[in-house]
Image (cartoon, coloured by chain):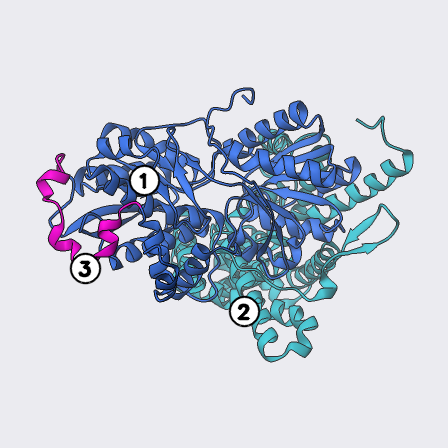
Chain colours: A cyan, B blue
Amino acid sequence: MFGDYSLGDLGSIFVMQGFAGLILFSVYVLMALGLAIIFGQMGVINMAHGEFMILGAYVTWMTSNFFQSYLPGLFSGYFFLAMILAFVASGALGMLVEWVLIRHLYKRPLDTLLATWGLSLMLQQAYRSVFGAREVGVELPQWMLGSLHVTDSIEVPINGVFVMCLTVLITIGVAYVMYKSRWGRQVRAVVQNRIMAGAVGINTEKVDRYTFGLGCGIAGVAGSAFTMIGSTGPTSGQLYIVDTFLVVVFGGAASLIGTIASAFSISQTQSTLEFFMSGSMAKVLTLLAVVGILMLRPQGLFALKVRK
Amino acid sequence: MSDEANKGLLSPLRRKLLMGMAAVPAITMLPRASFAQAPATSAVNTTGLAVTDTEVTVGILHSATGTMAISETGSIEAEKLAIEQINAMGGVLGRKIKFIQEDGASDWPTFAEKAKKLLVNDKVAAIMGCWTSASRKAVLPVMEQYNGMLYYPTFYEGLEQSKNVIYTGQEATQQILAGLNWIAKEKGAKSFFFIGSDYIWPRTSNKIARKHVENVLKGKVVGEEYYPLGNTQFNSVINKIKLTKPDVIFTDVVGGSNVAFYKQLKAAGIDLSKQALLTISVTEDEIDGIGGENIAGAYACMKYFQSLDNPNNKAFVPAFKKMWGEKTVIGDVTQAAYLGPWLWKLTVEKAGSFDIDKIAAASPGVEFKGAPEGYVRIHENHHLWSKTRVGRAKLDGQFELIYETADLVEPDPFPKGYQ
């Protein structure tokens, strides 16, 4: 297939393709981080993760509309405020959901799967009733559209660069909170031994609520960022949920490094294969590889070492 | 009624309705009095349908919930508008249309179940409904077993024909061939890159398009790619497009993927005012989600655009917006859904009966002059004769009409040489 092209063409295509893989990697990490916290640290299978993302997307849409109508002069910077609002909205909803629903189910992890799936259906219908069944278009400031012109044949999408930077920042933030802060130590203590953590004076209920809220809040930011690359509609969250679980489970629950490694290997495999065959076949082969590796290593790529 | 001066006195809506009613002048002249003249129920309904002396019941069967609600909402709205308009001018054979709406919930077995309920329990005289081919295929055996009548609005892949279905959208050849001819001639296009979602409609459509490109236009298909439904990452295929430099990108990507595709195309620096792109899956409805700035310049091949400049459409668009809100947009399928109740009404009046067998027999030749897309007529094969049009997407999310076929295009659900 390469016979007809000049070396220069091929070179720039490989650069672009490498970049496409990196963008896919960032997208995977961003959507999986929130779930990695909730599933990894708390053992809650949150099927409504996609809906928390879409809440973030709708918040972005509303912020964009607000700025267009009332503060058109500041429109070019609205996206940063929108991401913060998305974090707050999804995080707050997450804490509410934890308080009403999830905390009663900690001892029945499989039931959380059903409960959160029901929650996702309810949220979808709620979005449909509030925002309408049709997709909404989120208007972006001009500087976020288009591409950076590097050479005649290499163009770097600005939204891809934006998502990559955001992913790096959030990952560093999460790593700091989980592994360096006092609160992170409390979270890990609760994960390792809930009863002992309670006995040494950690308010485990509060830790649970904030952990769930943080995971949902990050989902909200991810949803906000994805308005640049995807659709915003009542059921758009469903587009992300399968890939998200795939990344988290493959990486090994409870491991931030695992999530990142898994996102990297899946995205690179996927985008390389996509270049040589049709998108559907690439997906099939990627999934087969993941299934094969999980059969050999059911705990995922990285797992916490615990005494059994 | 043919007096021009006289027409000017009527409201645009009434004028359109009258044009649609040209085939049955007696009722048009006396909409109010027609109740008294309504033929006896026993004469027009010999098979026990839900028809009384004053009312006739039809079913509306679409997904109001679930994934497909995004697309099907417009069809529901259009069908309700048509029914209201028909009732406002006296109904069908002097009977008001009452509708029962059922929710297919984006789930194909549910569609079949609800269709059975509408036919067996409610005895509806016709069903306006279904959207995806999967839902139609699920409903089809039910329609045939219980002898119902379905008015199906979506453009689809063809390869189907039933006595119990009237297809008010385009089958694949009606949608694709004229568009390809136009772009080949206009842009001198020789190489095409196909990209679609991975299911029956894009695959069948692309198969037809490929045969046409290779055998008729003597061009070349330099790539044919499918992505799973719901895929949100298109950077790899966009790189392949950049590598192969096709004259035309031909797309039938659907749903949420559509939004991702156009946003990423723009982000990758592909300028649609320079790179020709022809889509058969983007209507005004989809642009709402994609954003006009991401797709401006692309060509779409449809039979209807909201911006069409004809008297029927100039009455239809304000009526639709008045009923469903100023911001609502009207896409190709929404217009085709609007035709359903009208074609049924005209057919019933031609047959002089609500009986399904008589309607099925009377359907070929029924013409609707008040269609927003212009004149349409039902073919022997229960599809519509209609024009193919190409529009260019504008920043405001509307299409600008660029080309339309001079004549109506004959529907050909089983195209020879294309299978």
Taking depth in this image into account, of B374 and A174 the one nearest to the observer is: B374
Which residue has dot 1 on it? B110
Looking at the image, is mark 3 or mark 1 earlier in the sequence? 3
Which of the 4 quarters of the picture holds residue B46? Answer: top left
Q: Chain of mark 3?
A: B
What residue sits 53% from the left and 63% below the top?
A: A58
Q: Position of residue B395 (x, y in %)?
A: 64, 60
Q: CA distance from mark 2 to mark 3?
A: 48 Å
| Quarter placement of the C terminus of chain B | top right
Of the two numbered discs 3 and 1 in the rendering, the one whose residue sits closer to the viewer: 3
Q: Say what secondary structure mark 1 lies in.
A: helix
Which of the 4 quarters of the picture holds residue B23? Answer: top left
Q: Which residues are magenta?
A: B23-48
Q: CA distance from mark 3 to mark 1?
A: 40 Å
Q: Chain of mark 2?
A: A
Disc 1 residue type (three-letter): Thr
* In-image side of B370 versus A37 (left or right): left
Q: Say what secondary structure mark 3 lies in.
A: loop
Residue A50's tag is none
Disc 3 residue type (three-letter): Arg
Disc 2 residue type (three-letter): Met
* In-image side of A302 versus B337 (left or right): right
Q: Would you call the spot at circle 2 few (<14 residues within 10 Å), some (14-19), or many (20 or more)?
A: some
Which residue has dot 3 on it? B32
Taking depth in this image into account, of A235 and B17 the one nearest to the observer is: B17
